[in-house]
Image (cartoon, rainbow, N blue to C red):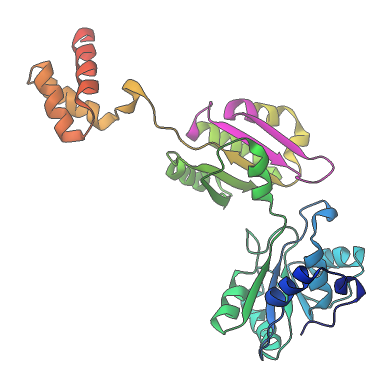
Amino acid sequence: MLRRPNGLQCALSVFEVADVTVQDVVNSVTGTLFVVATPIGNLEDISARALRVLAEVSLIAAEDTRHSARLLQHFGITTPLAACHEHNERDQGGRFLSRLQAGEDVALISDAGTPLISDPGYHLVRQARATGVRVVPLPGACALIAALSAAGLPSDRFVFEGFLPAKAAGRRLRLEQLKEEPRTLIFYEAPHRILECLMDLEAVFGAERPAVLGRELTKTFETLKGLPLAQLRAWVEADGNQQRGECVLVVGGWQAPQGDEAVDGQARRVLELLLGELPVKRAAALAAEITGVRKNLLYQIALETKKNG
């Protein structure tokens, strides 16, 4: 269980102490699984609460113990580490659950950012909840939220797609499925595939779709570059440095076309067939009933079709 607070913690305000008591201490037989966000680059982004919990739990389940050991050493934390990564998470989950069920507290961390967000931890959290273990999130750094917050694209509604398929065929297929998604889209991408990904985005979404590349966020060579997809692809292609480091792509959502372009191919085909048999006004009215497209819009298209035919 959590150890006794030190002098610094005792100096917390009454309100903060009450909050810690409610949030972090459980009077139960089982321990608590803390899901702890860690910095994605700048170590100053770790929270005071995260440091306290990491120092007080009995064990830290880490994606890469060698990587996390450097983080803990930097902050003088000596809590033992155990590996919990994508290759052993299902098998080793029981090991952590046993300790939780014995009354010990465990913290779950990934190499950087918030666990489970394109990182391991889902199976452990699911198993813990299924067995009645309390799971407590400690919010903090997350690359997708950091990129979205500074991208200047609509953020009221967005979709996080994580990593697209590594192979071109699978990637393009997924992008075709997202082509008319109106919400802002967020992708993670490996640096050695960022150029190929941008090329496919340009081919499927169009050259003018707005996008922002967030690279090496919070680190020394942080980049946030916003351009239409064709220009962004050309910029990355021309500068090899932009093909290094951790990448987040924020892409503007699909916008429904206006005017004549709002009539899809199927509606136009229906109108053309009816124009071959009926007067313009009647053909437009009947096409509107069949397709649901506004009659006035179809009538204007019918007039242009007759004029150009």
Q: Nearer the viewer, residue 203 or 206?
A: 206
Seen at 20% across and 34% down, the residue is 291
Position of the C terminus by quadrant: top left
Q: Is residue 189 left or right of residue 253?
A: right
Position of the N terminus by quadrant: bottom right
Can residue 276 be spotted in the picture? no
Q: Quadrant of residue 18?
A: bottom right
Can residue 154 be spotted in the picture? yes
Q: Is residue 172 left or right of residue 16?
A: left
**Is 244 above or below relative to 119?**
above
Q: Position of residue 282 (x, y in %)?
A: 9, 21
Q: Is residue 87 left or right of residue 263?
A: right
- In the image, which residues are magenta? 204-233
Seen at 75% across and 30% down, the residue is 239
Residue 222 forms part of the magenta stretch: yes
Q: Position of residue 198 (x, y in %)?
A: 60, 36
Q: Position of residue 276 (x, y in %)?
A: 11, 20
Seen at 70% across and 91% down, the residue is 102
Residue 177 forms part of the magenta stretch: no
Q: Position of residue 172 (x, y in %)?
A: 49, 42
